[in-house]
Amino acid sequence: MPPRSHTDLGVDMDGHVAILEIRRPPHNFFDVPLIRAIADALEDLEAHADCRAVVLAAQGTAFCAGANFGGDTDATAATSPRALNPIYAEALRIYATGKPIVAAVHGPAIGGGLGLALAADFRVSCPQARFSANFNRLGFHPGFGLSVTLPRLVGPQQAALLFYTGRRIDGTQAHTLGLVDELVDGPEAVRGAALELAQEIALSAPIAVQATRTTLRRELMPLLREAVARESEMQFAHFRSEDFREGVQAMSERRPPKFSGR
């Protein structure tokens, strides 16, 4: 059976590689339905015998600029301090799927968009791309499992630096840190290089690849479940703070925030 369709997510096959394309250009802001659609498609591909690897790509200028806090969004929709943010409940489904994923990060991957890129096994990018875990700069705790996945890739010291400052780094810096696995010359070459990597993975025995992936990631899911519970609890409080309102307003006005600690 083909993966379920979604107006903002394209699903195509190229040989043994599935290509999932986010279609909310130019920035590809996400909400619960979009993250759920990605999880649905990946779960459908679990039963697709011809699929041996997945490329996650996007239309527009950005890979994914995160949640759009300036518009209608359910990014803050957790109903109690102990309730899981519904976006992160869907993110756990993405992490739990078994086919290897290559993210084609041709443009900015910001906030939760960085979290989505790090849900993949590998990232192909270019110097022009931008990466930022900008949560603290907006006045709230990181999410999307990044409190596990970012230090796992770049180490705890560099992860803390990226979290605390919210700084943006380019694709070359991300490659040096280990955030990006392959760097190509420009945005137009990213998807093709990601597809080549996925096709190279698909040449290996699929039962062996997936078993090896399970072994390498066997401790990841328990850590992620604990992390997103903590992330959701902290965000529930921070989304109700003056600092969060100031952070979002400062971002929309393109000025430095003036936080009060409240």
Image: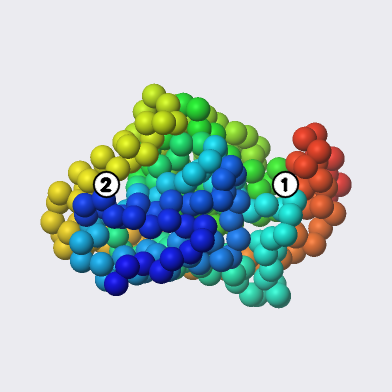
101 in relation to 226, above or below: above
Amino acid type of the residue that numbered disc 1 sits on in the rendered structure: Leu
Secondary element type, mark 2: helix
Q: Is residue 138 left or right of residue 26?
A: right
- Residue occupying the point 64% across, 39% down: 166
Residue 188, quarter of the rendered image: top left
- Residue occupying the point 84% across, 40% down: 258
Residue 178: in sight, yes or no? no
Residue denoted by label 2: 198
Colouring mode (rainbow / by chain / secondary structure / one colour): rainbow
The spot of residue 65 in percent (x, y) is 59, 45
68 in relation to 179, above or below: below
Q: Which of the image's four quarters has the N terminus?
A: bottom left
Task: Determine which of the numbered discs, if any, sits on residue 45 in the image.
Answer: none
The spot of residue 71 in percent (x, y) is 74, 54
248 in relation to 212, above or below: above
- Residue occupying the point 52% across, 57% down: 8
Observer-nearest residue: 23 or 34? Answer: 23
Observer-nearest residue: 245 or 49? Answer: 49
Residue 233, quarter of the rendered image: bottom right
The spot of residue 172 in percent (x, y) is 45, 27
Q: Which of the image's four quarters has the C terminus?
A: bottom right
Residue denoted by label 1: 138
> Badge 1, how many Cα within 10 Å: few under 14, some, many 20+?
many
Number of numbered callouts drawn: 2
100 in relation to 178, above or below: below
Residue 64: in sight, yes or no? yes
Amino acid type of the residue that numbered disc 2 sits on in the rendered structure: Ala
- Residue occupying the point 62% across, 34% down: 167
